[in-house]
Amino acid sequence: MRPTSVRDALATLPDVPEVDSVRLDRVARHYARHYAGVPATSSSRTEEAVLYRPPDAGLPVLLGLYGSADRLRSWLPGLPTRVNPESAAAVFDAAVRPVRVPDRRERRDIDLGALPILRTTPRDAGPYVTLGLVHAGDPDGRCALSAHRMLVLGPDRLAVWMLPGRALRALHEAATRRRRRLPVSVNIGAPPAAVVASALTTTALAGRDKLAVAGALAGGPVALTDAATQPVPVLADSEIVLEGYLDHTTADETLGRAVGASMPEFLGYDGGGQPDLPVLTVTGVTTRPDPLYQAVIGPGREQAVILGTAGELCAAVAGDHDWELISDLHYTPAGGGMLTLIVAVRRDSPRSEGRLKHIARRMFDGHPFLKLVVFTDTDVDIRSPEDVLWAITTRCNLSTDCVTYGGYRALRMDPSQTEQWAQARGRDGGADRTFIDATVPHRLRAAASRSFGRGLDGVVR
């Protein structure tokens, strides 16, 4: 049976560690120290799914569910093993519309303080909802499904950080101009397919609904039901749903206190507090029976797997005829699942030599977070950091096989792209984007074939 919920996915795991001796304010720190990998810590490892039962919390807390790409893949029968233009297009073409189901969810009192919402570090501005999918729509038929960090302001209020360009931000701004409230549902512990689909870009979707693509990934439609207090759907299989609305009300993330950070970002560094964040007012809370609370700690392999899985599908479908060279794509956890992309290409003719520049430029233009692209041959395991480094070490010379483009917008979450970094270095390269050609020149393929394993000709030696 295909997993349609978080608890279905958990049931497939043979042994889920349970920790009942850690207080709620230390759960995130405990997970980071004992289980988290790059970029939260310097440990190169997949992350275990761990169920915490804090003695001072009424609900269990789940961390690390998506800390393994292979584990996530086993729950998504529609996700291709190799991500290239053909396989990614097949996912989008197989989109399945959601289905409506009767409302069997349980109503709860509105009190965010009763939920085990984590404060990741003592430096945080407060506790944050970190893996709640915000679902919203407007009268024109536009909709949004995306994850945002949400700071708890009180028993029924959250401050929501929305990056520019996100669909939810556009819907909220449109509603504010009309002097209307924007009804939303915040789905915590949502189905795995919906979590991945929430990170897909609008460009890649090309008008498709994210939940329909989630159905393609899951191998069947996502179930929706009506919210109890707002005119908006909720994901029926979510563990916890917060119903509410966004209006013109705003709040500073630091709340006027001497707080220098918000919470750890996906690249492994503390985020900065933001001013004038929209405030979400909660009007209802529903749960499945005996719910659990799911979260991420910010950086780590779990966040990178979610972002990278969606990003690979998006990168594969955004090209042109040159994309026929692409055999597989992989966003590495080292780049938080967004900044570093490894691309295996088929170099099967001399005329393919100059086409990598075009592919790289198109990728940088279409993916503003992308900072580094590494091209390899198909005999390299692009999901093995050591194999990719081997290709960089033995199949390229950085002085000649490394190309940099300027003129892009800097990503401030990356310290090396800030103005302060440029001043310290004495030159500004923060907005630059670079690709590395770690492939064998076509006419030298016979001289640079591996002694063991799969050769450049595809033959196992």
Image (cartoon, rainbow, N blue to C red):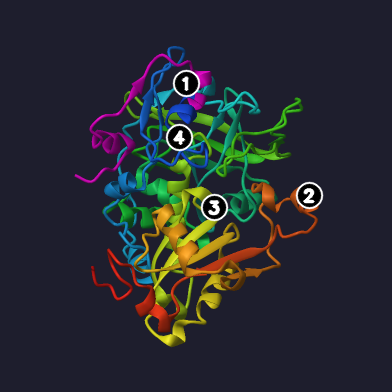
Farthest residue to the left: give it. Answer: 1
Which residue in the protein does label 4 denote? 36
Which of the marked residues, 1 or 3, is nearer the chain's N terminus? 1
Q: Amino acid at mark 4?
A: Ala
Residue mark closest to the camera, 2 vs 3: 2
Q: Quadrant of residue 4?
A: top left
* Mark with earlier residue (3, 4): 4
10 Å neighbourhood of mark 3: few (<14), some, or many (≥20)?
A: some
Foreground: 292 or 325?
A: 325
Closer mark to the observer between disc 4 and disc 2: 2
Q: Residues within 10 Å of mark 2 (few under 14, many from 20)?
A: few
> Residue 296's spot in the image, x, y percent?
48, 35
Q: Residue at x 23, y 46 (%)?
A: 2
3D distance between C-alphas at marks 1 and 3: 27 Å
Identify the residue position indicated by label 1 in the image: 109
Residue 255 in which image quadrant: top right
Do the residues under discs 4 and 2 have CB atoms within 8 angstroms? no
Across and down, in percent, residue 30 comes to 47, 24
